[in-house]
Image (spheres, rainbow, N blue to C red):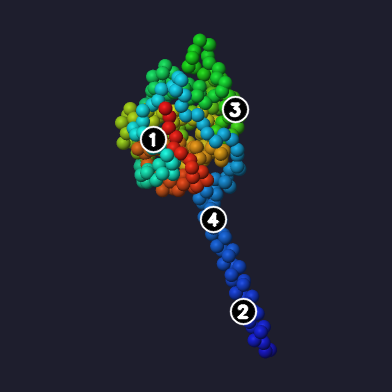
């Protein structure tokens, strides 16, 4: 059978179009995979949640500032991120919580331990134990990690519902420079209000010692503040970031290029 030249050209054109379509689909598939294994994994794993965009840092009427190793750099959080050293994690096999001092000391010497200071700062209204100006017994919070309205009531089990989270987890800090700090500097890091937020207990447990590459708050509105606060803490205590952590922070800050660093006191 004889095939005309026109028919041959039409077949060639359809073949080229088919291959072009396959190429476009392949590129789209690769782009989707790249998105998923970077920012998309968080979006796919967790539905978008709206909530507060900031959390309290410092109240000078009754708190005293904790002196960090270095002052928090003023200005852009993105610029401060670029100023952090990028390195891999140090070993964690020798990590102990006691390396950061006894939990919830009165580091700022205002007469109240750190846990009660943070509860008082973050809850509203606050109920105190009878005869005490320190021991927080109850309060409400629009919790920043989940965006949920929660109530706190002190008790053997109920106290766990609101926990005090280290924004830069102490385990993460230990692997990224805290081993090189003095015991007193590590104690300050563990009790600095800049590094502490009253948070939903299950969310805090889920975060564990994760950094921005492995955990971000479900509340999308809070992520810029959260990442800026991590950057500020790391700058203040001479801690470094990993490559993956820095990239995750940059992706968050891409949505808020005017985000500034955060300081306490």
> Which element type, helix, strand or loop, lies under badge 1?
loop
Marks 3 and 4 sit apart, C-alpha to C-alpha, by 37 Å
**Residue 232 seen in the figure:** yes
Q: Position of residue 190 (x, y in %)?
A: 40, 29
**Residues at discs 1 and 3 in contact (Cβ within 8 Å):** no
**Residues at discs 1 and 2 in contact (Cβ within 8 Å):** no
**Residue 209 seen in the figure:** no
- Frontmost residue, 184 versus 69: 69
Task: Judge depth for marks 4 and 1 and give the one in front.
Answer: 1
Residue 150: mark: 3
Extreme residue toward the right, this view: 1
Q: Quadrant of the C terminus?
A: top left
Q: Position of residue 102 (x, y in %)?
A: 39, 24
Which residue matches tag 1?
72
Marks 1 and 3 sit apart, C-alpha to C-alpha, by 31 Å
Marks 3 and 2 sit apart, C-alpha to C-alpha, by 66 Å
> Which element type, helix, strand or loop, lies under badge 3?
strand
Which residue matches tag 4?
33
Task: Judge depth for marks 2 and 4 and give the one in front.
Answer: 2
- Frontmost residue, 189 versus 57: 57
Marks 1 and 2 sit apart, C-alpha to C-alpha, by 64 Å
The answer to which image quadrant residue 50 occupies is top right
């Amino acid at each position: 059978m004889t095939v005309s030249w026109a028919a041959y050209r039409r077949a060639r054109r359809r073949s080229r179009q088919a291959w072009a379509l396959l190429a476009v689909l392949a590129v789209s598939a690769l782009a989707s995979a790249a998105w998923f294994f970077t920012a998309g994994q968080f979006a796919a794993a967790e539905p978008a949640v709206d909530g507060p965009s900031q959390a309290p840092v410092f109240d000078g009427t009754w708190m005293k500032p904790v002196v960090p190793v270095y002052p928090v750099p003023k200005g852009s959080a993105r610029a401060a991120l670029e100023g952090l050293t990028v390195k891999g994690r140090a070993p964690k096999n020798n990590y102990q919580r006691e390396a950061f001092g006894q939990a919830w000391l009165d580091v700022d010497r205002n007469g109240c331990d750190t846990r009660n200071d943070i509860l008082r700062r973050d809850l509203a209204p606050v109920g105190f134990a009878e005869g005490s100006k320190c021991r927080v017994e109850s309060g409400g919070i629009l919790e920043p990690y989940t965006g949920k309205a929660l109530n706190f009531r002190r008790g053997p089990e109920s106290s766990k519902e609101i926990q005090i989270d280290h924004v830069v987890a102490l385990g993460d800090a230990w692997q990224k420079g805290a081993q090189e700090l003095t015991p007193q500097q590590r104690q300050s890091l563990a009790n600095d209000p800049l590094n502490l937020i009253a948070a939903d207990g299950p969310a805090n447990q889920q975060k564990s010692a994760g950094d921005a590459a492995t955990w971000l708050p479900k509340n999308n509105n809070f992520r810029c503040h959260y990442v800026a606060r991590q950057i500020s803490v790391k700058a203040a205590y001479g801690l470094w970031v990993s490559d993956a952590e820095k990239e995750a922070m940059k992706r968050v800050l891409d949505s808020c290029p005017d985000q500034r660093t955060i300081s306490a006191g």
